[in-house]
Structure formats: structure tokens, C-alpha cells
Amino acid sequence: MPETEIRLGVVGTGYVGLTTGACFAHMGHRVVCGDIDQRKVDLLNDGHIPIVEDGLEQIVNDARGVGRLEFVLGSQAAATDADIVFLCVPTPQGDDGSADLSYIQQAAREIAPILKPGAVVVNKSTVPVGSTVAVERELQRDDVFVVSNPEFLREGTAVRDFLQPDRVVIGSADRGAAEKVAELYDSIDTPIIITDPASAETIKYAANGFLAMKISFVNAVAAMCEAVGADVAAVVDGIGSDTRIGGQFLKPGPGWGGSCFPKDSRALVKIAEEHGYNFSMMKGVIDVNTEQRGRMIDKVAKAVGRHHSNLSGVTVGAMGLTFKAGTDDLRESPAMAIIADLRRAGARVRAFDPTTCGELSPHQESTLDGIELTKELIDVADGADVICVFTEWPEFAKVDLDQVAARAGAGTTVVDMRNLFDPFAVKSAGLGYDGVGRN
Ligand code: UGA
């Protein structure tokens, strides 16, 4: 091993920590990842990846194979001898909407006594403005630097997003520490934005807030399209062609979900409030998202000719449960929230999702309590009074619509919350169709 090799420690092997560690190892660095969960460490050391993430298994195992990546128990074991330590631990939402920093603080306290002089500690988790300073306070080490380096990884495409980022953001009060972190990305051709910690931390929240705003905006436009008889696809095409607007992240749907947008948008409102600013626009973005779920429930009720509060005796066939395609994540999934409301109104729900049709993980089993899971997609059509498309899994679009009609019965409506199907094809099969913002 060359003497100048930078050694990296990663604390936390969730999807951010694991992707960060594996990608840096793939880029040629020597990485040690630590986690408090012995079972997870064992699994990873056996080559098993606990999350669905395209390409991750391959790069983890390639890097392990050449001895550049290892998994150890605990944060101290990961940080020992490291030049740079990435904190990639959860920042769940506290009861009041603010981000709970206790995991970050605990990790900082744990590694403080064993950090090498001159080491750099990097906040990779999404942390509120001021957290870089908070970590410095926990460390109580004058010879260690703390830097913010927010991640912009999407679940499902995290590896690609890491290796081909639109930009890398580094926030530090110390130029030398920022440059040390910047060097890690030398092999990637991307702009590197070096700024102060508060700006880097704000960039992360503002980016997620802006993306959530785009989706809420298009969902509101979709509602408007339905009212005036316009077609949202044509409208998005028209506005998205303006390079100042851009066509990405303008797909209407059942509302945004997942482990990031809901938590971060609420935290953004809260952080602003704590600093004396009423971020009313962000509150509106969240409200539109909540309303969107209500609008989807109204569509289901309309499809079966009932009021949304009384769906007893109605069988709903659900296509998809995860918060988006390409992930097995059910956290804050619009599908799960809408299904919970449908069930509260008395509906029976039968669902298929490609990631939950096999053996269920313990957290999925409890989350899916009350929802009947089918083995095959087509089975959700059996006896369904209405079929809901919640997740845009591409394979759903290939389902045999004639078979769906045969098993559900002619006249059953498909409420296509992702505009996945061709309305004419659905209608030709003898089914009813209702999409989002489609005329
Ligand atoms: C999001 C951001 O896209 C990442 O840049 C960020 O790093 C990440 O949060 C994070 O903070 O860790 P992710 O939560 O994986 O990534 O999911 P997205 O692909 O952004 O989708 C979020 C939600 O918006 C999903 O429910 C999705 O279905 C919905 N969406 C997305 C739409 O309804 N329409 C769109 O056009 C795009």
C-alpha cells in the first residue's frame, strides 16, 4: 500500500453509507465501513447486500475482492487510522418535524477519542444548518476538521448518481480540509462547489425542497388540466422545453414520498421557523402533496360510484406498494398512505409489488398488515371493483389487459396514478380508465 494512500472510514452502512463506501472503494480508495448491527456486518462480509440498489452488489464485491473495502462492527473500528471519516447515520424526523441529530452526535462522541490528529470528519447525512458546528462541539478536538459534503443520491440509481454526479458540494470553514475531501473525487469529471458549511447544508435541503416543489407544481397543474379539459403530458412537454424550466421531475403522480422528501421538506419549514422565517411556499408544497393523496382517493371512490368515506364491500386491486419503482422502500410511500385510508373506509385491498411478492422482511410484514399480497401481478385483478396503479414499475405496463378485464370483469376502472398505461388500450380491453391530468 503506498504511504500516501488516503484511508477512509464510513460510519453507518445504510443506503448512503454503503453506496459512499463502495463507490469510494471502486474509485481506488481504501475504505472501512462500520455499523452497530453485527448481523448486517456479517451479511456484508459474506457478500450479501441488504438493500435493492442497482449495481451496488457488484461494486461492493469487486472492491472486497481486491481488499479495498471491509466491514467492521462499530464506529470506532471504522474510524481508527482513517484520514477522513464520513458520518452516514440516520437523521430521523423528531416529533416536531425537526431532524433528530442524536445518532450523528453519538457517532461523533464515539470517534472523538480515537481520531488521528489532522483527521477530517465529514457530514454526509442530511443535517440541519448548523450541524457542522454541532459535530465540532461534540468532538471537542482542535486538531480535527469537520466538513459538510451532502449527498444527492436517489434510491435505485444511487451508484450512478455517486459516480456521475451533476456536482459535488463541500462546505468547510477550512480550505485545506475542503480540498482534502475534494481530492477524493479527482477521478470524477464534475464541478466541485466549495463553500461554507451553512451554505452546503442549505443546498441539500433547498435541492430536495425545489424538487418536491416541481412535483407538487405539476400535480397541481394536473388537477387544473382535469378541470379545464387539458392534457398534462402536452403541458409538461410545452413548459419543460423551456430550458429555464427543464422537463425533468415533472411527472404527475400520487404525490411524492420516500425517506427524504417528506422528512426534508418538513425540516426545511422547521429550520426556517427556528431562524424566524415563515417558509410559506414550502408549506404550500407539502399541503399540495397531502391534497394529492386525497384526490387519488376521490378517484377510487368515483370509479366505484361511492363516497370516499364509505367503501365497505369494495375490493381494490393494487399494482405497486413502494414509494417509486426501482426500490423496495415502503417508507412514506403514497401507496401505503392511500391504501391505509381506503382500508379505513372499509375497502379490501389486494396488492402486488415486485419487491414484496417473495419472502417479506420483518418490517415489511408489519407494514403490510391487513393488505393481502398476491403472488402474481395479474392476481390483483381477481374480483377487483377498481384497480389502482400506485408505482410505475415498467413491467406493469406489459400486463395483458384482456386478462385483467377477464379476471376483474368488464367495466372495472383502472385508476392509473402514474399515467403508465395507454388509456385507449385500457378502454379497448373493456375497462374504464382514469389517469392524472389526462383528458
Ligand atoms: C431524493 C432526491 O431525488 C435525491 O437527489 C436525494 O439525494 C434523496 O432524495 C435524498 O435526500 O437522500 P429519492 O427519495 O430516492 O431521492 O427519490 P426520488 O427519485 O427523488 O423520488 C421522490 C418521490 O417523488 C417519489 O415518490 C417519486 O415517485 C416522486 N416523483 C419523482 C414524482 O412523483 N414525479 C417525478 O417527476 C419525480
Image (cartoon, helix red, strand yellow):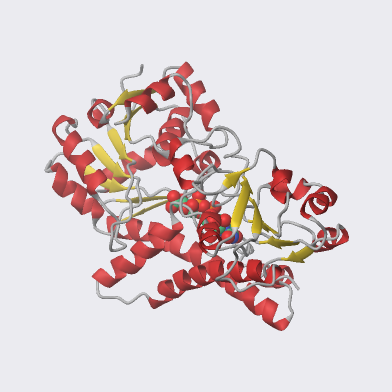
Residue 17 location in percent, x, y?
39, 37
Residue 244 seen in render: no
Q: 24 or 423, which lies in front?
A: 423
Q: Residue at x 38, y 28 (%)?
A: 40
Residue 47 location in percent, x, y?
48, 21
Q: Residue at x 47, y 32 (%)?
A: 50
Q: 13 or 227, which lies in front?
A: 227
Q: Residue at x 59, y 60 (%)?
A: 347
Residue 66 location in percent, x, y?
46, 17
- In the rendered image, the quadrant that contains the N terminus is top left
As displayed, is residue 364 above or below residue 133? above
Q: Residue at x 61, y 71 (%)?
A: 298
Apparent side of residue 136 relative to residue 42 in the rendered image (left or right): left
Residue 278 seen in render: yes
Apparent side of residue 6 relative to residue 349 in the rendered image (left or right): left
Q: From this viewpoint, which residue is outermost toward the bottom?
A: 228
Apparent side of residue 3 relative to residue 212 in the rendered image (left or right): left
